[in-house]
Image: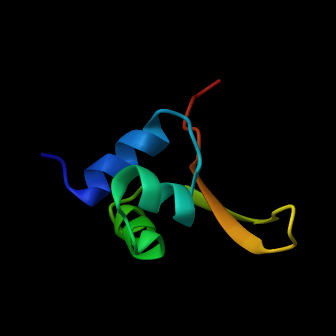
Amino acid sequence: MKNQNELLLAHLLSGRPITRISADHLYRIAALPRRIADLRERGHKITANRKIDATGRVYVEYALVNRKVA
């Protein structure tokens, strides 16, 4: 069984962004910022973009930086 960091990295490597709510629903990751910090400590480049939903609430969407070389 994969741990939370492995699940999260696989998700991000697939090219999909993730939010706290989707991480909780998909992978039962309650502390997404901590898992993101773990991946950053391992050298992964992850962006954090603040967004606003339809109700005006602010949330953060994390995505892996694309490392393709031109």
Query: Residue extending furthest left?
Result: 1
Q: Is residue 21 above or below residue 67?
A: below
Image point (35%, 53%), residue name: 27
Image point (44%, 66%), residue name: 36
Q: Is residue 61 above or below residue 69?
A: below
Measuring from the top left, give residue 44's x and y in whole percent. Answer: 43, 55
Residue 47 picture quarter: bottom right
Measuring from the top left, give residue 30's x and y in whole percent. Answer: 40, 72
Asked if residue 34 lies left or right of residue 53, the reply is left
- Colouring used for the render: rainbow
Give the number of marks: 0
In-front residue for pair 11/27: 27
Can the viewer see residue 23 in this picture?
Answer: yes
Image point (79%, 74%), residue name: 57
Can the viewer see residue 45 in this picture?
Answer: no
In-front residue for pair 39/26: 26
From the image, which quarter does the C terminus lie in? top right
Measuring from the top left, give residue 25's x and y in whole percent. Answer: 45, 56
Residue 50 picture quarter: bottom right
Residue 51 picture quarter: bottom right
Image point (30%, 57%), residue name: 5
